[in-house]
Image: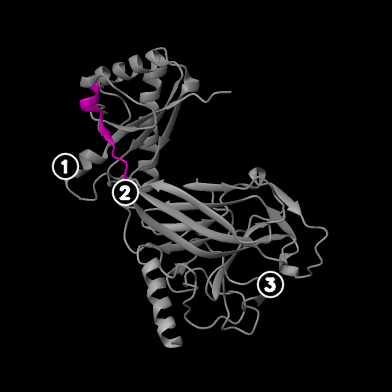
Amino acid sequence: MRIAITIYLAICIEFGFSQNLVPNPSFEKYFECPATYNAQGSNRNFAPGWTSPTQGTPDLFNRCSFGNAGVPHNWAGVAHAHSGWGYSGIYAYINNSDYREYLQAKLTKPMTPGRKYKVEFYFRLSVYSKYSIDRIGVLLSDSLQQVPHDNIWTVKPSFNYVMDSVYSMKTGLWNHVQFNYVAQGGEQFINIGNFSPEVEVKKFHLSFSKATEPLLSKAAYFYIDDVSVVPLDDVVPKIDSTELTVKKVLKPNETYILKHIYFSFNSYDLEPISYEELNFLVAVLKKNPSWYVELSGHTDDKGNNLYNYHLSLNRAKSVGRFLAGNGIAVSRISTKGYGKLKPLSKARTEEARSINRRVEVKFSEKKKP
């Protein structure tokens, strides 16, 4: 009977994780049973499926260990796993220090453009931490990240989980992070950590804590467990503005691919042929004075990342300047550049590159006071 129950549970667990795109999601697998905190360089994977995108050194904990990397007792505190026998650990904040740690895993397959995904994981503050902070973030990217330092990774995350309180009765318990994400297409890496600069982070010194671990005397250290990226059935299509221009219908909170915006070669100077569609956008914004507009520029795969980022941003700004020059308040316009990070097509043909060179527009309604 015990054998039958064990087999049944194994089948249930396998079925439950069958759609999860994150490998080794609860850190149960290891290359060797961890004995202490990770002192290895970040170029080495610290667990199957997991590595560090920076020079920081995340830790692995498991019940197999009887040393500083055990579960529930380890060098950073006392905590049972959220599920299973293992979890990871990272420095999320150190007072008066830029040192941070991050986790990175490659998904089992890239995300599909326009498809919605449920992203979730659990984290908790380690018992021996002398500081508590209010946030942790997630970055979904299309390429392997290898940041050449162990300081704050200054990149805008895909999602920032910010708690209402820096310290509460739940601080030392497992906290659940969950959000839905609509894929641009091609994202295949998940990164977890605190991406916020220190001036944005709210912190609380746990002066009443009796913990004496010197490595955590100025730190907020988070355990991480049960990371999940699951595809949902919802598909959010991008709408071709060609048809919408004919119908004269636009809606907020939808992304439109502008098909008739042209620039000089390797330039962000607008060609005159673009003016007809841009004048249409001006008319839409004047008709809907409570709407804001977000413009995002994109390039093809030619050229290096930095150059393409600046080119895409400047092209979005050129469209923004046209709108502002035709009576749209600058406060209603925001611009972003993505370079070649979010292609609509992964092909290397000229036709695909032509599709990927674009400006997208998204309207949003003004928030009520």
Say left or right for 124 vs 182: right
> Is 71 above or below relative to 158?
below
Which residue is tagged 2? 185
Q: Residue at x 20, y 50 (%)?
A: 348
- Quadrant housing residue 275: top left
Estimate how packed mark 1 is, as few (under 14), some (14 to 19) or many (20 or more) residues with alpha carbons within 10 Å. Answer: few
Residue 221 in percent (x, y) is at 65, 62
Q: Is residue 266 visible?
A: no
Which residue is tagged 1? 351
> Is 336 above or below relative to 226?
above
Q: Nearer the viewer, mark 2 or mark 3?
A: 3
**How much space separates mark 3 and mark 1, taking CA atoms?**
57 Å
Among numbered discs 3 and 1, the one appearing first in the sequence: 3
Which residue is tagged 3? 78
Q: Secondary structure at mark 3?
A: strand
Where does the N terminus fall, quadrant-wise?
A: bottom left
Q: Residue furthest front?
A: 1
**Kind of residue indicated by mark 3:** Val
Among numbered discs 2 and 3, the one appearing first in the sequence: 3
Q: Secondary structure at mark 1?
A: helix
**Kind of residue indicated by mark 2:** Gly
Q: Was residue 240 drawn as part of the magenta stretch in this picture?
A: yes
**Kind of residue indicated by mark 1:** Glu
Q: Nearer the viewer, mark 1 or mark 2?
A: 2
> Is 351 above or below relative to 10?
above
Q: Residue at x 27, y 33 (%)?
A: 239
Q: Secondary structure at mark 2?
A: loop
**How much space separates mark 2 and mark 3, taking CA atoms?**
40 Å
Q: Nearer the viewer, residue 193 or 358?
A: 193
| Highlighted range, magenta | 234-245
Where does the C terminus fall, quadrant-wise?
A: top right
Among numbered discs 1 and 2, the one appearing first in the sequence: 2
